[in-house]
Image (cartoon, helix red, strand yellow):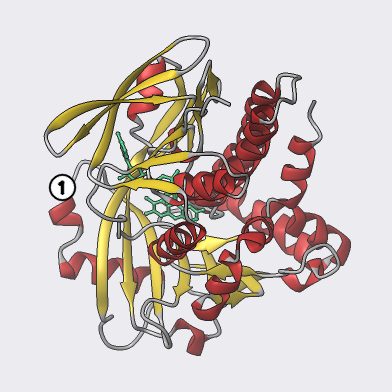
Amino acid sequence: MTKRLPVVIAGAGPTGLMCALALRKQDIPVVLCEAESDLTHDLRAGAFHPPTLEMMAPYGITEQMLVDGIKVRYWQIRNKPGDLIAEFDLGLLADVTPFPHRLHLEQHRLTPIQLDILRNEGGADIRFNCKITGYTQNADGVAVTVERGGAVETIAASWLIGADGGRSAVRKATGIEFEGFTWPETFVVASTTHDFGEQGFAYNCYIADPTEFGALFKLPHDGPPGLWRLAYPANPDESDEALLEAPRVEAALQRLVQKPGPYDVVYKSTYRVHQRVTASFVAGRVLLAGDAAHLNNPLGGFGLNSGIHDAVNLCDKLGRHWRGESGGLLDLYSRQRRAATVEQVQAMSIRNKRMMEERDPEVQRARLKELIAVAADPAKAREHMLSTSMISGLKRANEIQ
Ligand SMILES: Cc1cc2nc3c(=O)[nH]c(=O)nc-3n(C[C@H](O)[C@H](O)[C@H](O)COP(=O)(O)OP(=O)(O)OC[C@H]3O[C@@H](n4cnc5c(N)ncnc54)[C@H](O)[C@@H]3O)c2cc1C
């Protein structure tokens, strides 16, 4: 029997690693190409929803994440003086998921777990310092061009998965439009040792305010006691250096949650947020997943989660196709995941941001009042939990044929 060409995966982020694991589990040959010399280690995602934990559990990933991750059963909406407006209890979902909580763990703590499991599984050809620059394809395969150690090589592949992040070279080479928009503001992220728990804050809080809103998460960092991370919008016309000056960050944190004495700020950075989805997740033998296919603002914690959902859906269908099953499985991948992204992730993250930043105090008060009513009604609260935990949107999308 002739040996089949491998699936080449661009990017060893959480999505690419998940694709590699899911394909190796089905004994499909994989070449994983990462442009950097090692896994990336920056302040990014850190909140995992129940379906994502369920999807990663069969690979042994979730079990390892639970060792240091922080289980977050409650999340809250607060106003700027810090008063509690509404609290939601994920324990209401105990009958539909074995993980009735969010799990907070830094993205850079997830990827080493995935990589270790992939290496232990064996059989994957993992290449760091290997940047994918383009490809050509025909009906039988893809010729993938990579730069490695200053040299240009071509890898013959059966399929190419672009999991190479928001600036995806693979997506750009497909020519598929990345539809959507970029928000005007820059976001500042700052981590502090201050324990907001002492003030009654849940490990995940959203602070709504007509002039300045914020999102607060507790993350494990190097282990207990962990760090609290605050993200807030800032003026994009100012330089990153200016926005990150210590007195500016201190003043912003004090405005969001006032406390006696200065904040001890351990990390700080800025980032721009986008709402974009590719017109299709499939271009012949080239498949897009994760941030390469969609970007959203971080309110709700959907980006990384949906990258894992893409990887699991895609590799299930690619595996079935590989084993000879017919029926447009890869187009179905695109339809299902695009629907989940547009109807669930884009809609909810945009709605969350608009509610948090609503400029008209009257309108914001009315919207928050609605949320208070939802939180107070167990049936409505459960619906809200099913939706914000990505459970109902995922179910709807997976029913698409
Ligand atoms: C500040 C911030 C906070 C966030 N918070 C959350 C959150 O709370 N919850 C959530 O779910 N999401 C969050 N996100 C989004 C989340 O980080 C991303 O959705 C996630 O990183 C996507 O994973 P990915 O593997 O698709 O892409 P990436 O993590 O970007 O990985 C892509 C990989 O591809 C590599 N690469 C790039 N180009 C090439 C190339 N040409 N060839 C080979 N390799 C290449 C990169 O080096 C990288 O390792 C946040 C993002 C930011 C910026």
Circle count: 1
Query: Assess mark 1: CB under 8 A from ligand 1?
Result: no
Residue occupying the point 45% across, 16% down = 176
Along the horizontal axis of the image, is 55 left or right of 4?
A: right
* Residue farthest along the front direction in this orientation: 1
- Which residue is disc 1 drawn over? 239
The kind of residue tagged 1 is Ser
Question: x and y percent of residue 271 in the render?
Answer: 31, 48
* Residue farthest along the top direction in this orientation: 138
Placement of the N terminus among the 4 image quadrants: top right
Question: x and y percent of residue 81 in the render?
Answer: 48, 73
Is residue 308 placed above or below 136 in the rendered structure? below
Q: For residue 78, which quarter of the picture? A: bottom right
Residue nearer the viewer, 227 or 162: 162
Q: Is residue 354 visible?
A: no
Residue occupying the point 56% across, 39% down = 28
Residue occupying the point 58% across, 69% down = 103
Is residue 256 placed above or below 44 in the rendered structure? below
Placement of the C terminus among the 4 image quadrants: top right
Q: Secondary structure at mark 1?
A: loop
The residue carrying pointer 1 sits among few (fewer than 14), some (14 to 19) or many (20 or more) residues within 10 Å by Cα, namely few
Residue nearer the viewer, 359 or 380: 380
Is residue 44 placed above or below 344 in the rendered structure? below
Question: x and y percent of residue 7 in the render?
Answer: 48, 33
Q: Is residue 59 visible?
A: yes
Along the horizontal axis of the image, is 297 left or right of 155?
A: right
